[in-house]
Image (cartoon, helix red, strand yellow):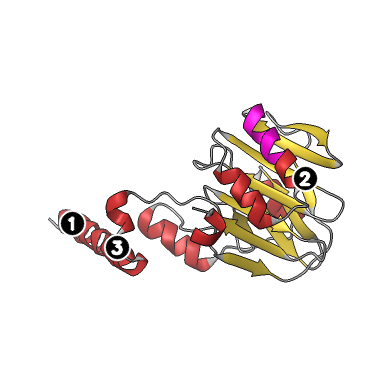
Amino acid sequence: MDPTLAHPRFDAAPPAAAPRLLLDGRPGWQRQGIDGAVVHWTGDAGPALAVARAIAATGFDPARAAAALAATDGHFALAVAGANAVIASVDICRSTPLFHATSPVTGTVIGSDARAVRDAGGATGWDPVPVLEFAMSGYVTGSDTLVRGLRQLRAGELLHVAADGQVRTARWFDYCPAAAAQRSERALREELMAAIDAATDRAIARATG
C-alpha cells in the first residue's frame, strides 16, 4: 500500500526563512553531494544514500520521498538539501533523533542536538502540556518536547521544507500490530487512558497504605 495514501496526515507551519541544518561536525554524521543536492546522513550508508538519490531525482516531492523511505530497510537518519527545498527523516525506530524549530526570525532549524536547535531556532520556555504529560507518565507523546516551539520527528516520519518556507511533516510508517489494526484510534486512546488511571490508582493506594 502506498504510505502516502495510508497515512495522509500533514502538520503545517507558517512560511519562514531559508532552513538551516545543524549537522556538520556532529558525531557520526557525514555529508556528501548527490545529484545536485547535499545529503547529511548517519547510520547505514546504503539505505540513507539510496533514499537521498530518490529524493533528489523526484524533485523533493514529499509523497515520493515517503514511498522511497517506506521501501527501504535500515537504521539511519538523513537531511537532504536542494536549491529550494529540504527533506529530513528518521527511520522506523528513530535510532537517531532529529529535532526542528521554526520561527519567522530564524526560519526552520534542523539538527540532532535538541539544545542546539532550541537555541538557534528561538524556541524558549517550557510547554505546559508536554511538561504535564511527562510529570504524569514519564514520557511526552507525539512530536512535542518539553520546550515550546521545539519539535521532534517521530519514528517513521519525514519533514519537508518547501521553497516558500512552508513546513510539513508526514508519517510514512506506523507500527500497528494486527490486533490493534482492527480498532479505532479513539478506542485505543481510551484503553491507554484507562490503563494510566488504573496504574495511578494503584500508586495512590500503595502510597496511602
Q: Which residue is mark 1?
A: 202
Residue 99 visible: no
Residue 195 on image: x %, y %: 24, 59
Indicate whether 27 appears above or below 182: above
Query: Which amino acid lies under the numbered mark 2 shown in the image of this protein?
Result: Ala
- Residue in the picture at 61% in, 64% down: 148
Tell me the magenta residue range.
Answer: 45-52
Q: Which residue is mark 2?
A: 56
Residue 69 on image: x %, y %: 60, 44
Q: Residues within 10 Å of mark 2 (few under 14, many from 20)?
A: many
Q: Secondary structure at mark 3?
A: loop
Query: Which amino acid lies under the numbered mark 1 shown in the image of this protein?
Result: Arg
- Mark earlier in primary sequence (3, 2): 2
Q: Is residue 62 left or right of residue 184?
A: right
- Residue in the picture at 72% in, 56% down: 61
- Residue closest to the far bottom: 14
Question: In 3D space, how far apart are the residues under numbered discs 3 and 1 (Cα atoms)?
Answer: 27 Å
| Badge 3 vs badge 1, beta-carbon distance below 8 Å | no
